[in-house]
Amino acid sequence: MASAQSNSSSSSSSSSAMPAMVSSGLPVNSSLLLLSNMSSMMTVKLDYGNYVVWKHQIEVILDTYSMIDVLDNSIIAPERFLKDSSGNVTTEINPAFIAWKNREQAMFTFLNSTLSPAILALTVGQKSARGVWRVLEKRFASISRSHVISC
């Protein structure tokens, strides 16, 4: 029984770093599977009149799926390359960096999928989920504050 538990816990802990397999034998990033679930729950696309509702809905979803840390700067990107025993950078890619990058890019894709075309135009040039989030917060911060004051 302990052996079955350790096998199941080790496979679940490695699933975030290792891609899942689909029936075709092609790897599928687990962040993309999560993205699909989150996208189906998002019923509002951000436009100029619904920032407070959109932000509330997206924060609840991100909190539910433990993805809010991608946006709140509580996780720092791991080093891209591994270091050897002497602390020197190697040419070997850090698996933790790949897992972080996959998760960040899934979030970037998810955020963009929740924006109306007019709002998406505001984020052109951003290359990360955090960048998109900062642009949106900056653009809509005064709307959010005035909504809270008027309630």
Image (spheres, rainbow, N blue to C red):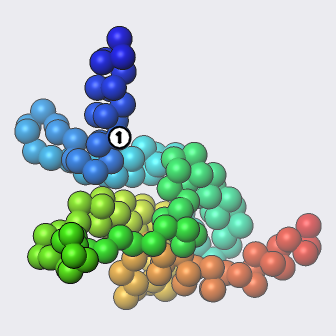
What residue is drawn where x is 29% and y is 43%? 14
Crowding near the residue tagged with mark 1, few <14, some 14–19, many ≥20 C-alpha atoms within 10 Å = few
What residue is drawn where x is 8% and y is 37%? 24
Residue 81 visible in the shown view: no
Secondary element under disc 1, as helix, strand or loop, is helix
The quarter in which the N terminus is drawn is: top left
The quarter in which the C terminus is drawn is: bottom right
Query: Is residue 146 positioned above or below 23 on the image?
Result: below
Tell me where residue 63 appears, x and y as whole percent: 59, 52
* Residue farthest toward the front in the current orientation of the protein: 86
Residue closest to the eye, 1 or 146: 1
> Based on the displayed image, in which of its 4 quarters is residue 141 positioned?
bottom right
Horizontal relation, residue 146 to residue 70: left or right: right
Residue closest to the eye, 93 or 43: 93
> Based on the displayed image, in which of its 4 quarters is residue 87 positioned?
bottom left
Can you identify the residue that label 1 sits on?
13
What residue is drawn where x is 29% and y is 42%? 15
The kind of residue on which mark 1 rests is: Ser
Query: Is residue 23 positioned above or below 109 on the image?
Result: above
Query: Is residue 22 positioned above or below 126 on the image?
Result: above
Horizontal relation, residue 38 to residue 74: left or right: left
What residue is drawn where x is 17% and y is 39%? 21
Tell me where residue 30 appears, x and y as whole percent: 30, 47
Tell me where residue 140 appears, x and y as whole percent: 67, 81
